[in-house]
Amino acid sequence: MEKQLFGKEIKRIRKEKKISQSALTEGICSQSMLSFIESGKYVPNVQIIVKLCNRLDLDTDQLILNDHYEISSVEKFSKKCEELCNSHNYVELNDFLCRESVLDSIDTGQQMQAYYYYLACSQFHMDRDGRECLRSFKLSLAESDTTVTSTISMLSLMGAAAVYSKFGKKGSAISNIEKAMKRVDAVEYEKNLNILFYLQAYAYINLNMLVDAHNAIESGIEFITSHDTHYMLGNLFFLAAKIAEKAEESNQQRDSLQQSAIFEKLFSEKIFKNIP
Amino acid sequence: MNKPLFTNIAMITQKKEKVQAFLEKPKSILKWDSDISLLEEQAEGLRISRVHQSLNDKEVITIKSDNDKVTYHIKGDRLDYEVMFELVEEDGLLEVSETLLLPEKTNSHLPLKLLKPIAKHAFASNLENLAAIAEQL
């Protein structure tokens, strides 16, 4: 099952982006290997998966919402916000959101909630200590109902979890993750919910909780495929490969330390640990 | 049919019999697996709930011992697997090798090649804990 799904998704994205097999594989692997991968007959090593995903532009440091939220009753302001967000122009987005005319055009609680969400997203890429960004996610949540039943509330909770994880605040990050995921199966489905699983895994990676990150991706793939969609699927595969790569590096370090320890025990040999 | 996914090894200074007896005792797992939140001994095996960093949130474990091997058979809410501990004494040291075995067909969505380094990493931490505890038996 897993080989087919992975291969099919690589093929779907490659075709969607109109990239030929030879262009995708150049300098990475052979074209015949890609054919085997796409037909679900073979899974390459982690390094090749990462390279293929990179070439397919699946790295998602900058997420794009599938459906955008209205921040203002003035249509052109909501449209401008969407454009700046999609083009990852976060500095300009931040400037735009701080304009008095934009602030004055916010009429409803829902618009205010979306406004703070976008503001937090722009700050996520600019903020050094995460404080402003966290404050904006919290203000977005303050505009929602207390039971957290809307997708944007869940995204704000998970966004805050991502910020907490970035600064090593494990308890707050996990608590936010749990709150954000609590009702994911109970609310009406919309594609933006798929992002939650990506951010959840991202937060766990920052906390070095690699098994949990992997489990979050497994659940995300289950969730996405059960809703018959592809949105974020390729990105989840890429993140899974990045987690595996990180674990491999850590395993290599551990193996070499362990070998030294075994030598030390076997031969009562002192290993020089601090070689200048 | 289960296939080995990876093996981790630890060398410890301890008698084989002591470590084997420790691994055979179900409740010993509480001493070296730090992510267990609840453990109940039931007729079908040892029922375990975990907090984080585990392949499953809930598992039922049965333990079988045979000569130099102790095998944990695990039925989980996500994944079924086996952990086989092999104990070999050599030059006054005990080599404890821990092998994770998975069924050829799992219900995993991600390729097993991606799970392998992550699971190896997580199991190595617990093996380190086990080795440290076993040396003090």
Image: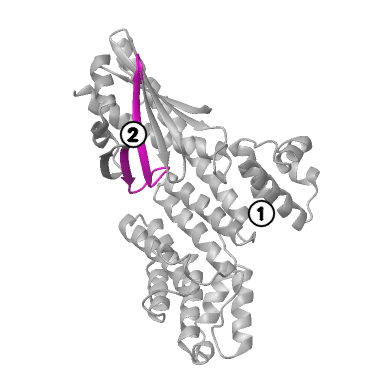
Residue A91 on image: x %, y %: 54, 71
Label 2 – label 1 distance at C-alpha: 36 Å
Q: Nearer the viewer, residue B120 or A270?
A: B120
Residue A156 on image: x %, y %: 44, 70
Colour convention of the picture = one colour
Residue at 59% x, 58% y: name it.
A226
Residue count near mark 1 (Cα–Cα under 10 Å), binned few <14, some 14–19, many ≥20? some
Disc 2: which residue: B126
Residue type, mark 2 in image: Asn
Above/below status of A51 relative to A147:
above
Disc 1: which residue: A57
Residue at 78% x, 52% y: name it.
A19
Judged from the image, the secondary structure of the residue bearing numbered disc 2 is helix
Q: Nearer the viewer, mark 2 or mark 1?
A: 2
Quadrant position of residue B106: top right
| Chain identifier of the residue bearing label 1 in the image | A
Judged from the image, the secondary structure of the residue bearing numbered disc 1 is loop
A94 left or right of A170? right
Residue type, mark 1 in image: Asp
Q: Quadrant of the N terminus of chain A?
A: top right
Quadrant position of residue A36: top right
| Chain identifier of the residue bearing label 2 in the image | B
Region of the chain picked out in magenta, as a range: B46-69
Q: Nearer the viewer, residue B48 or A207?
A: B48
